[in-house]
Amino acid sequence: MSKTIAVIGGTGLCDWPGAHLLESREVTTKWGSPSAPLCRYTYQDAGFVFLARHGSGHSVPPHAINYRANIQALKDAGMTEIIAVNAVGGISERFVSGVIALPEQINDYTWGREHTFYDGHDGVVEHIDFSYPYSEPLRLRLCAAAEHLGIDIEPYGTYAVTQGPRLETAAEIVRLARDGNDIVGMTAMPEAALAREAGLDYASVCLVVNPAAGVSDTLITMEDIQAVIDTGMVQVKSLLARCISA
Ligand code: HPA
């Protein structure tokens, strides 16, 4: 059982019903407090540390998350790998509601977030390589777990990270499509970059929960999103458990 894999859960995965809670630990870091206590769980033979990105009751919006504290807390706890779970909108054709995507690229459209550990305050300047923002070995392990379980996935994709908390305009989605993005969400950055700065392997499991603005001819409703989450997260959880325990 791995003792060093963490799962950062997003919208639709703020807790883990059915998992066995071994420990819940309130921690703090030099950057402040993470969104929630670090919970050590076992689920379907997998052992991992779980952190609710938006807080245990989904109370922290994407732009207000203390991403530095979240990543630092996981690093301080001895984690070496992070699997992030993100609910996203689908932009390009194959990324319809219910699809699980394992992206391999990011376009960052966020602004004003505390986005680096190298903020210059301690006189250390570092420019990390971020050509390939996700860990390819971890992404491939997730692919293998999906294949083992017979879960259909989109193994590639480019994730556009927007500021939120509002959803996008239809015109913004046209632009994001033109930029080559397949999916859109609000939380992959600066999380992925901070994980790289901290030397942690990081991959993401994205559940497409709605067609992005203007992609379908109906408006986006929270009820529709919740319905996709209710069925999709069951598969996401099995995928994570298989990947972690394999
Ligand atoms: N846009 C941005 N973030 C999201 C969306 C979306 O359509 N759906 C879920 N998170």
Image (spheres, helix red, strand yellow):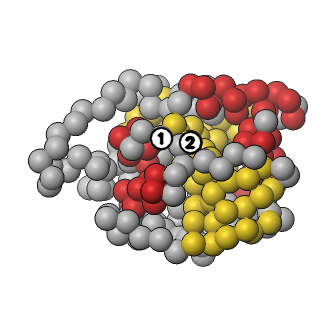
Residue drawn at point x = 85 percent, y = 52 percent: 44
Question: Can you identify the residue that label 1 sits on?
Answer: 200
- Amino acid type indicated by mark 2: Glu
Q: Is residue 237 left or right of residue 12?
A: right
Q: Is residue 124 left or right of residue 188?
A: left
Q: Is the residue 174 above or below the residue 210 in the image?
A: above
Whole-Å distance between the Cαs marked 2 and 1? Answer: 5 Å
Q: Secondary structure at mark 1?
A: loop
Residue drawn at point x = 66 percent, y = 25 percent: 140
- Would you say the residues marked 2 and 1 are in contact, meaning their CB atoms lie under 8 Å apart? yes
Q: Is residue 215 visible?
A: no
Q: Secondary structure at mark 2?
A: strand
Question: Can you identify the residue that label 2 sits on?
Answer: 81
- Amino acid type indicated by mark 1: Leu
Q: Is residue 201 visible?
A: yes
Q: Nearer the viewer, residue 19 or 231?
A: 19
Q: Quadrant of the C terminus?
A: top right
Residue drawn at point x = 63 percent, y = 66 percent: 39
N-terminal-most mark, 2 or 1: 2
Residue drawn at point x = 52 percent, y = 39 percent: 202
Q: Nearer the viewer, residue 24 or 16?
A: 24
Estimate the x, y position of residue 120 in percent, counting from the top left. Answer: 15, 49
Quarter-wise, where is residue 208 in the image?
Answer: top right
Q: Is the residue 18 above or below the residue 189 in the image?
A: below
Q: Nearer the viewer, residue 77 or 148?
A: 77
